[in-house]
Amino acid sequence: MKKLWWITALCTAAALGLALPSEAKESGKFKRILKPGERQKYQQQIEACVKKGAFIAYFKDDKGNLEPVRDTFNTQDDEEWLGLRFSEYEGPRIRLGVLRVINKSAEGEEREGSGRIEVPVAGIQDMLTSALYETKRFDVVEQKRVEEVKAQQTRTDTSEPAPVTIMNTGKVLGVQYLVYGTVNEWNPERGSRRLGPAQFKAGKNEAEVTITFSLTDVSNGQILFTTSERARLGEWSFAFGGGPNGESGEAKQNTPVNYAIRACANKAAFKIATFLRDRKWKGSVVEIKKDGKKTDYYINAGSQQGMAPNTKLSVQSVQGIVKDSETRTVLGEDLRGIGTLEVIAVQTGFSIARVVEVSKAVKKGDRVELATDPVIPPVPAECMALDTTREL
């Protein structure tokens, strides 16, 4: 009987082509087909280029194989996005804030008359925050900082944040951009299959979610970039023994909705990093102190944001907010260049700068940005060929 039990289990697994579920399971289905010798050489090239920061993103499967990311449509399945990685990066990091997730899913409203289905908006926000941080290109505001300005957020779970709310929240958090997600489709139990005799049962649960991610500019509260990402992932589970009705001995079923959320968050992080890759870091003068005959200007970026001594910063004086008189739409800030500062000291969360040359007095709240583009080490031609994100 025991022998028959194992034969049944093995045959069922073989027939279905099952892959055992695992929290650590990532990717293993890259489209690029190479011979063993070519694969090893290709992997060595990718590993060398990753260390040089030649491209911003790549997949890593559970066998250690690497593959550069082209776009969110160039993979065979959503499972590959669980293995997303980013190359190292040194330089100023753009500061992002992550707002509370909005739930607009029709599926999340009712559950057989028992009330509203809980969509884990806090969990989705945490996964998005983590995905953006793992790009190594951003300084992401911590969750507790977002909580500090919740009182200023007038939106509910079903309304978009107003431009004024974006601007006020961005100023309090000291960020350049705010990101938020909107859950459009939420189906944690999209489908399931159960196979096998009474003594052995195999089942697969599937989840599918669609989340729209929006990137907003805090200078005017307008949406700069938006992307809608869908992910569908399944997980197999097994049960052995039990009575003829399966009332005992059945393994707990796994719902892979967290995998689907993580895949969507990783896709969005990749696209946002690609969209912002050529945009300059921007900050503000947050404090001014006299030091003898010298004046120190405190900037809201330090070593944690990639700031370094001797960095030259352009200073822009804020003249006010510009609005469209007819639509009352906020168009942005009126900024006027007034000179240059140079960073003389760097702490973890801030830097101290002094005047190189200015045409008028620098005041708290004035904007600063890099006076020159960051100096990036030269990248070999073979590595540039792998960086296909430039084509997006």
Image (tube, rainbow, N blue to C red):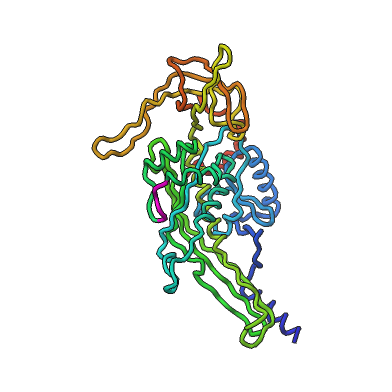
Above or below — where is 108 with respect to 100?
A: below
The structure residue drawn at horizontal position 66% and vertical position 81%, both measured from the top left corner, is 248
Question: Front-most of 363 and 106?
Answer: 363
Above or below — where is 292 with respect to 75?
A: above
The structure residue drawn at horizontal position 67% and vertical position 51%, both measured from the top left corner, is 39
Above or below — where is 177 with respect to 121?
A: above
Above or below — where is 222 with respect to 37?
A: above
Residue 343 point in image, percent of width and height:
57, 22
The structure residue drawn at horizontal position 54% and vertical position 20%, both measured from the top left corner, is 289
Question: Front-most of 25 and 344?
Answer: 344
Is residue 77 in view? Answer: no
Which quadrant would residue 236 be assigned to in this image?
Answer: bottom right
Question: Front-most of 251 and 8?
Answer: 251
The structure residue drawn at horizontal position 54% and vertical position 42%, both measured from the top left corner, is 141
Assign the magenta stretch its main secondary structure: loop
Residue 294 belongs to the span the image colors magenta: no
Q: Determine whether, in the image, residue 28 is placed left or right of residue 125.
A: right
Q: In which quarter of the image is the N terminus?
A: bottom right
Is residue 207 in view? Answer: yes
Which quadrant would residue 136 be assigned to in this image?
Answer: top right
Q: Residue furthest left?
A: 326
Magenta residue span: 153-157
